[in-house]
Amino acid sequence: MTRTEHRLNRIAQGYIDTEKGVAWFEALPEGDRRRVLRSLSHMLAQSHPQPQEVQEAVLRSGLKATYTPCVVMEAKEFSDACGKVLSLPNDELVKAFRLWMAIFSISDGRRRATDCKNGCTHEWHNLRLMTFRRV
């Protein structure tokens, strides 16, 4: 797990406050923001978000449902939506990050509570025990 993946998981699981996570993301140059979002899109895909979780995430994120990332994620098939969001202009990336972190927090939380409720070997569900590789 890379440092970025570790940080994203810590934000999603509440070890890092969401607003601190957003501040970290906002401070990144555009190229790094896009790299972080690509990593987050892979993590999202692995968490298998359900349509109702996207709707819940829009509310949780504090974003208006009419913001482009919200509209795209609710209107399109998941993989198509992620591709569209990744191609949004720079001024939409923070909104995308907020939304995707909310989706990931919800969907990965569901998986931790169901698939992994009796423990698992997923390193991202065992953050206290894991180390990360440098990339």
Image: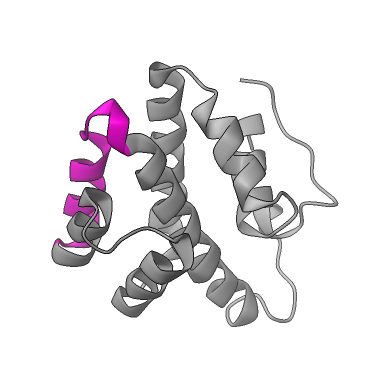
Query: Which residue is painted at 37% across and 45% down in the image?
Result: 95
Occupied quadrant, residue 23? top right
Instruction: Tell whether 3 sits left or right of 53.
Output: right
Q: Is residue 51 visible?
A: yes
Q: Which range is magenta?
A: 76-92
Is the C terminus in the top left, top right, bottom left or bottom right quadrant?
top right
Q: Quadrant of residue 77?
A: bottom left
Residue 9 visible in the displayed image = no
Residue 64 percent across, percent down from the top left: 31, 60
Q: Residue at x 65, y 75 (%)?
A: 116
Q: Position of residue 15 (x, y in %)?
A: 75, 54
Q: Is residue 18 above or below residue 86?
A: below
Above/below status of 33 relative to 108: above
Side of 88 relative to 5 (left or right) = left
- Tell me, yes or no, whether the highlighted magenta stretch contains residue 83: yes
Q: Position of residue 110 (x, y in %)?
A: 54, 76
**Residue occupying the point 40% across, 75% down:** 56
Depicted 94 relative to depicted 108: above or below: above
> In this figure, which colouring scheme has been used for the structure?
one colour
Predominant SS along the magenta part: helix
